[in-house]
Image: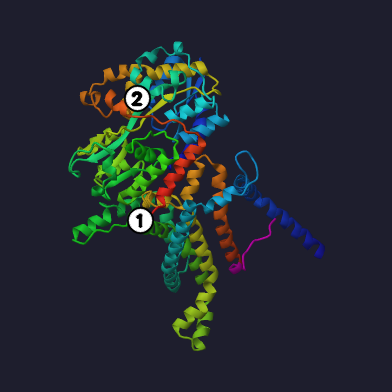
Amino acid sequence: MKKALFAGALLGVSLFLAGCGKKYANGEVVVYNWGEYINEEVIDMFEKEYDIKVVYDEFTENEDMYPIIKTGAVNYDVICPSDYMINRMIQEDMLYELNLDNIPNYKNIDKTYLQSAEEFDPGNKYSVPYCWGTLGILYNRTMVEEPVTSWSAIFDEHYSGNILMMDSVRDGMGIALKYLGYSMNTADENQLEEAKQLLVSQRPLVQGYFVDEVRNKMIGNEAAIGVIYSGEAIYTQRENSDLVYVVPDEGSNVWIDSWAIPKNAKNKENAEKWIDFMCRGDIALLNFEEITYSTPNTAAREMIKDEDIKNSTIAFPGRDILDRCESYRYLTTDVEAMYMKKWNEMKVSN
Amino acid sequence: MSKSNTKLASRNKWMQRFISAPYVVWSIGFIVLPLLMIVFYGITTKDGRVTFDNLKMIFEPTNFSTLVLSVQLSLVSTLVCLLIAYPLALALRSLKLKSNGLVILMFMLPMWMNFLLRTIAWQNILEKNGVINMLLGAVGLPKLNIINTPAAIVLGMVYDFLPFMIIPIYNVLAKISDDVIQAAADLGANQFQILIRIIFPLSLPGVVSGLTMVFVPALTTFVISDILGGGKILLIGKVIEQKFKQGNDWNGGSGLSLVLMVFIFLCMAIVQKYDKDSEGSGVW
């Protein structure tokens, strides 16, 4: 996540570049999306078809994006935050309600995901799902005795030194909570304390706490078991066929990144055109092929040629798996501070 | 005569001010103002009331133990740097190179590469299936398991900050006149006595500035502990980063930064004491 350092520089460069170029008949749309989270061809296609100039900026973390929207430092027309951040922005009245009449391709979005999205956007009024995935376990079948199906594997002394844990407060605490049978969104201090104790006992067994590095370490056979996002799992399997991704039986986190329009947008109609374009089957397919994160777009999924990918339970888990999963909600500053405090107490324990 | 001299002096003074203006503007905008902002955030609450709670946060058991660990690791790294750098600087001095350029280049060259990249390289070298363990395995020796331990962090700190120790010490040593050393020898001092009683005291300013230049960045780093510690070792720099980013608690982060600054001011005070012949002060 050191990439955050570059986000500022990128922002400056892209704003500068935005000043150049030809005239467009229908104004502009200013897009703020995650880094490496689109097929760049798609941006050109949108500009040509709608005669709207696209100013495209990228962020690395929800927490980097939030203050820019909150303070109105830049007037973005359309943004792509994660579930809990959308939840927070709705609570703080920072988003416009969408006019679905302007987004006819909305029909392509699978009802299953709209239903999941209701957890953070009740009534699906403010956001349209773009990409989604689960949090789960990636294991190396040559290094474990039996297939992993439960979070218990990452708390198993047997795999001491061979476990890669997720270095993220919400994910790390969330896993422990889920294993204990609690909600990943709990605000109960006793449950959090219990989760912390579990993580304290896990700490000596863990090789390290990572985020992005898990992918390469698992490919390089550095560990037997790692916690990873599903979007990375397909890539790791291509590189190392011994790796298996599983969403544990106790359930896990399902996350959804969705398009939304902030209240300080200047081109709301163009933003809705952008969202509609992203929901078009062929466009969603182009994006899926480029970034390999799961698409909620049924039209796009129909068009996938590779049968293995089309029927992959990693990219497209069934309803049974999703029913076990929970999305994160925004928990107020105080509760999130408590999560971080418990996590840090675990980190300094002996 | 004296009149034109003062005129000249005042013109020089104005010239100096003119030339240093960009630097002064820069340091006000990017050093003084941000520092004042940190002080402001550090002693206020979210709604702007004055408080010392942010500073007291350092005494929370979690934060305090990260501070203690940070101080320990950076002290060890600084000491190791000194033990490596001093003999090396002595050896370089005895080479009597005509130009310092080559020496400086030798130590600066690796620093031209981004230090993140060099630290990540160490991660690959030290890993379980990394370069060192592959070599050890090939000749049948037991594997080295220091990645994700404090030892790996100390190694990373020493590697990254060693040049900051060597260069100031070498600069001071190179300036010590041979006459002084010969005089000591003439008066009957042996090599060891010359080193302990002549060279070392004369080199103290360099040693002190080297100690500071290693200790301060080592104390505040969070990148090295992230990369080589595998997230298992939490240092105070990381806690501050978390406060600012994930926690969105600028007041708390600033408060902890202020506490760290106490250490930095202490170091600066020590340097000031030893570095008496500083040049070019008093422009403004």
Picture coordinates of residue A69 (x, y %)?
Answer: 53, 29
Would you identify the image quadrant in which residue B152 lies?
bottom left
Q: How many marks?
A: 2
In the rendered image of this protein, does residue A62 appear above or below residue B235? above
Disc number placed over residue B149 in the picture, else none: 1
The reply, left or right, for residue B125 in relation to residue B199 is: left
**Residue in the foreground of this view, choosing between B106 and A186:** A186
- What colour-coding does the image apply? rainbow
Q: Is residue A192 magenta?
A: no
Q: Which residues are magenta?
A: B273-284
**Structural crowding at the residue carrying mark 1, measured as other residues with C-alpha within 10 Å and reported as few (<14), some (14–19) or many (≥20):** some
**Residue located 55% across and 21% down the image:** A266
Say which quadrant the C terminus of chain A sits in. bottom left
Picture coordinates of residue A297 (x, y %)?
Answer: 33, 19
Image mark 1: chain: B
Disc number placed over residue A287 in the picture, else none: 2
**Structural crowding at the residue carrying mark 2, measured as other residues with C-alpha within 10 Å and reported as few (<14), some (14–19) or many (≥20):** many
Query: Element under label 1?
Result: loop
**Residue in the foreground of this view, choosing between B232 and B104:** B232
Picture coordinates of residue A2 (x, y %)?
Answer: 43, 43
Prevailing secondary structure class for the magenta stretch in the rendered image = loop
In the rendered image of this protein, does residue A64 appear above or below residue A104? below
Say which quadrant the N terminus of chain A sits in. top left
Q: Which residue is the extreme one toward the front?
A: A190
Question: Which amino acid does the dot numbered 2 rest on?
Answer: Asn
Residue A23 in view: no
Between tags 1 and 2, which lies in front?
1
